Image: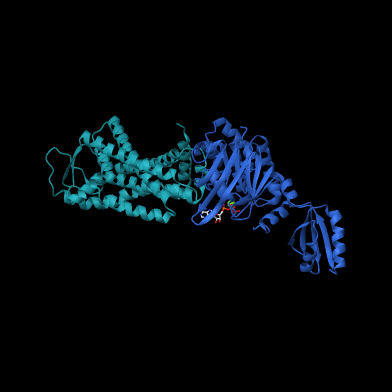
Amino acid sequence: MDGPVIEVANLTHSFKDTVAVNGISFSVKPGEIFSFLGPNGAGKSTTINVLTTLLALQQGTVRVAGHDVASDPEEVRRAIGIVFQEETLDRDLTVWEILEFHGRLYSMPHAERRNRIDEMIRLVELELKRDVLVKHLSGGMKRRLEIARGLMTRPKVLFLDEPTLGLDPQSRIHVWDYIRQVNREGTTIFLTTHYMDEADSLSDRISIIDHGRIIASGTSYELKNALGQDIIYIETADDVKTTTVLRTFSEVKDIRPAFRGLSVIITTDGTKCLPAILDRLKAEGIEVMSANLKKPTLDDVFVHFTGREIRG
Amino acid sequence: MGTEFTTIYWRDMLRFVRFRALLFSSLVQPALWMAFFGIAMTSSFDRFAALYPVPAGAVAVPYLTFMAAGVMALTTLFTSLFGGISLLFDKLWGLLREILASPAPRSHVLFGISLSGMTKSFIQVIIIMLFGLLIGVKFFTGLTILQAAVAVAGILLFVGVFSLGFLFLSSTISLLMESPEGLQAVITLLSLPLFFVSNALYPAESFPPFLQAATAANPLTYLVNGIRYFAIGPDFYALGNHYMYTAGDVVLSFLALVLFALVMFAIALRTFSRAVVS
Ligand SMILES: Nc1ncnc2c1ncn2[C@@H]1O[C@H](COP(=O)(O)OP(=O)(O)OP(=O)(O)O)[C@@H](O)[C@H]1O
Ligand SMILES: [Mg+2]
């Protein structure tokens, strides 16, 4: 397939009087890892539910793996895999039975299915839990099992709704590795996450979504560059006065309150700009306690576009 | 035609044998019903039956035998009406999402769940037959082994189609309900009139005309007819009534059940294809 594997145009979805998704458009190329980054209630899961045919399309057009979700939902389902945000495991089946059930649901041939189940159980390191009931697994193990299940059918497009929710740091890194591995083998990945480091490390492209709208899109690099060259964290005796002074610099793009002091986005090389700023503040009689220069991170991008820290 | 329904069936049966308490009660309950209700009622009903003489040479059937057929039918009714509950639980636990997002056709999901419900009814009906024979129910009298096997197959055929019909109905209700309590309420409301306006435990012949009409619209009546025909015979007396079933009656009863099951399937499929994840 040469065209985009996911094509969304003007998608709007409402629940009664809540507009959960408000006219979003985007496309994902084959083989990409594409991430939706957004605070709680932004509309990420709603978008996934429409793309995976679990919610009926209300407005707009959506094509997944070349098929229209409204007119051809069966073909879409054949092409996709999903890891849901909420637990979707039958607690009274064993690890092996969960995977066997899933493989049969997708009509995987017997031999291939059995091999894949073994492979998946090894991949998520549940060998010792193979015949244990799901209700006796820990939370993180259940999540790993769900991920194994999502990966096992080798779908064309895999939707992962906050896949590493509730995982310990080591397991998260492992899961990132599995995701990269299936992606290398040709599966396009659509990911939602709250974790900046996750989006940053995995994604080819990222869209930031808030209040049902896409407010920024691009590679992680582009998003950070769009923000500015550098960020200065500065802590002074008088933030209000400092803000007024800094606004007179043409290099200063944006000033926001930070944890302590201010975070100042600048459009030029910070190593040159910072001494000039410090000189000016001294001349104005403002005491500077600390100043710190760094490159923008995805967190800064997120705060810049959504106007707040991640709502956890 | 794929085989995805066998997958759904497999999982549902796996859960059935895994929930020990549920398995145990569904196996023991019909036998208990036979034992207590049957034996208690038989002693009083048979006294009345003695008041009605039976023509010479005719078959007079004791109440226990008469009602055993009814207990088989009622057990099938209740088990099937509740059978759709696994769909409700799947919905409430979010498990239905995995299935709905998969390529397995909706019809297979319905069919798989209903087939497992049907299997449970088969098991119960066979237990009632065996237990009944043990406590003196006069089923299959005068039949050769082969004829008895055909009769059992006939009974299972009726039970199967009937239970599928009610399982589809139960699935529809489950898909529309938000809680097991809601399902329970609707089912109780449904099952009582079905139970009473039928010929399962007493003759419907002496009902007033409007109740007789209701009896004719009750699928349970047709199931009971089928079971009695195969288990007791085409011509017998019970509780002072003369029962006669021609082969034509039996075929018509069967077709009525088939029609019922098909209509219920169509309704369930329609409901299911509109189901979305909430
Ligand atoms: N079934 C529903 N009925 C009514 N409103 C809903 C439903 N599902 C979601 N919403 C609303 O739609 C909006 C978007 O929800 P959605 O689940 O898509 O957010 P999200 O980005 O996935 O958030 P989170 O990060 O918390 O998972 C929210 O305002 C939510 O309350
Ligand atoms: Mg969500």
Residue B43 higher or lower than A233, as above or below: above
Residue B127 higher or lower than B178, as above or below: above
Q: Quadrant of residue A256?
A: bottom right
Q: Which of A285 and A135 is in front in this view?
A: A285
**Residue visible at 59% across and 40% down?**
A6
Q: How is the image coloured?
A: by chain
**Residue visible at 86% across and 62% down?**
A278
Q: Which of A107 and A242 is in front in this view?
A: A242
Give percent across and percent down for residue B199: 24, 47
Residue B203 visible in the snapshot = no
Quarter of the image containing the N terminus of chain B? top left
**Residue visible at 22% across and 33% down?**
B247
Chain A: give its colour. Answer: blue
Indicate left or right for B20 with A278 as reference. Answer: left
Residue B30 visible in the snapshot = yes
Q: Which of A82 and A280 is in front in this view?
A: A280
Give percent across and percent down for residue A118: 61, 36
**Residue visible at 18% across and 47% down?**
B205
Indicate left or right for B207 with A297 as reference. Answer: left
Give percent across and percent down for residue B34: 31, 48
Indicate left or right for A59 with B230 as reference. Answer: right
Label the cyan chain with its letter: B
Q: Number of callouts in the render?
A: 0
Give percent across and percent down for residue A15: 50, 54
Indicate left or right for A246 with A44 as reference. Answer: right
